Amino acid sequence: MGFKFMTAEEAADQIKNEDIIGFSGFTAAGCPKVITQALAVKAEKEHETGRPFKIGIFTGASTGDAIDGALARAHAIKFRSPYQSSADLRKELNNRDAHYYDLHLSELPQYLRYGFLPKPTVAIFECCDVTEDGEIILTSAVGIAPTVAHLADKIFLELNHFHPKALKGMHDIYEPADPPVRREIPVYKPSDRIGVPYIKVDPKKIVGIVETNLPNEVGGFTPTDEVTEQIGKNVSNFLTSEIEAGRIPASFLPVQSGVGNVANAVLGAMGSNPNIPAFEVYTEVIQDSVIKLMKENRVKFASGCSLTISAETLNDVYADLDFFKERIVLRPQEISNNPEIARRLGLIAINTALEADIFGNINSTHVVGTKMMNGIGGSADFCRNSYLSIFTTPSVAKGGKISSIVPMVSHLDHSEHSVKILVTECGVADLRGLSPIQRAENIIENCVHPQYKKLLNDYLNMGIKGHTPQNLQACFAFHNVFNKTGDMSRVDWNDY
């Protein structure tokens, strides 16, 4: 192989202050792991001498600690987009030590091509193989890698021998043309393959290869508990009722599901429900529950952007690649999250809310309206364009001191117009065809924790008369009281 092999430190030495780097990967799957850690060490040394060193970062979604964590702790991030989940980076963002552009995941690749955002000058990809003529085989995720590969001036590869070369064939790399010559994206069922299994670049752009043998940094998911299991049952039973009513075809529809323990519980409940037929998945993140259901013949096919699965589950997949390569495809995120495809396939979109209000608006990103948690991710890519948009959330948090359903969301990510169904462990609120007052009554009756029902009913009754009976003097009382006392249930409407 004619490429130059080097150490992570040698690669980091070639990256300069103010460089803008685009990474492979989506969540902690498929992300580089060693060059960025060397880069963090370099940044710390530069800072010790009084010299500035910060870089701009574009990724597919969140990353492992080796990127977001290491670089955040080294105060080496100038800006970051489009999604993150690192506690250390979250501190940087909320302290405004780094700027953060929270974007819909499907939009980032085209925004980069359009020139709406700074051009990536450097690409760092994890791959399991690369050919002399510049065909790069990615590992367990795709993200924005195809677009960044074309835009970047130079590419560094981490050739990770942990991931088998036999992964070739699991990826489907397709980059749409830009307007005004863009055509329809020809995905008509989740299993359709429309591209090639590699990223093709000019070999001269590959300036260095660092060999590694490291697993993904994907941690295990929190086990289901009584609350998440009940949310899963509520979603599953609701979908069964929709099939019985003829509002979902008897053959069912493809499913999109968000990330985390609630999403795993929901998919698990759907898989164990005999009234829901075996189904296909068209989503961004393929999780452990999908692999489990695939082995049980309850998931027929899964299209996603990443294999965000535990180490044990990934080992199972790699041990039986012939089986899984026939049932899984990994795509760039502007295809996995594409609104056109979501609308065409008729996805059942199931995403998690951080906070909802009694009128059906959703906050997915900000704690008490000001502090960024993770980001909007792909939830809006799917929910607004789905056949059926479902949001789930536990009704309370912190032992009941926080109600997940409030008079008015403290930050708006998804408006009432995009939210069709709200589910908590308490029940299901079907919001289709309801006026604001009807939505509020439905949500309070079916989804609100008993501890907060009277408070929210009293709020609704004190609302200013109008189409949406909101009281602007009291709408953030839950948040204000929480900030003062740490307990939303202490609200006293006599104070308003």
Image: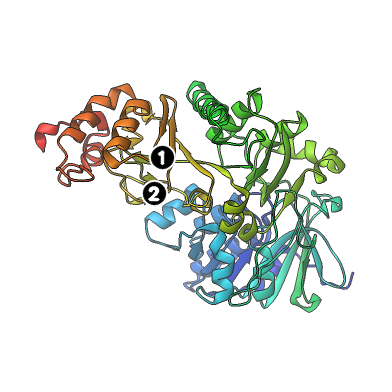
Is 267 displayed left or right of 201 in the figure? left
Residue at the farthest front position: 246
Q: Is residue 459 visible?
A: yes
Q: Quadrant of the C terminus?
A: top left
**Considering only vertical position in the picture, is 188 above or below 272?**
below
* Residue designated by label 1: 432
Image position, residue 249 (x, y; %): 61, 36
Q: Secondary structure at mark 1?
A: loop
Give the residue type at disc 2. His
Write the residue at 15% across / 31% down. Answer: 492
Q: How many marks?
A: 2
What residue do we see at 51% from left, 55% from top? 83
Question: Pointers 2 and 1 in contact (CB under 8 A)?
Answer: no
- Left or right placement of residue 208 versus residue 107 in this view: right
Q: Residue shown at 70%/60% (left/top)?
A: 186
Identify residue for label 2.
417
Return the disc, 2 or 1, that comes first in the chain's sequence. Answer: 2
Q: Decide if residue 469 is on the left or right side of residue 260.
A: left
Helix, strand or loop under label 2? loop
Question: What's the amino acid at mark 1?
Answer: Arg
Q: Examine the rendering and report whether any part of residue 119 can be seen.
A: no
Percent position (x, y) of residue 453? 27, 26
The image position of residue 439, as x and y in percent, is 32, 37
Camera-side residue of 455 and 120: 455
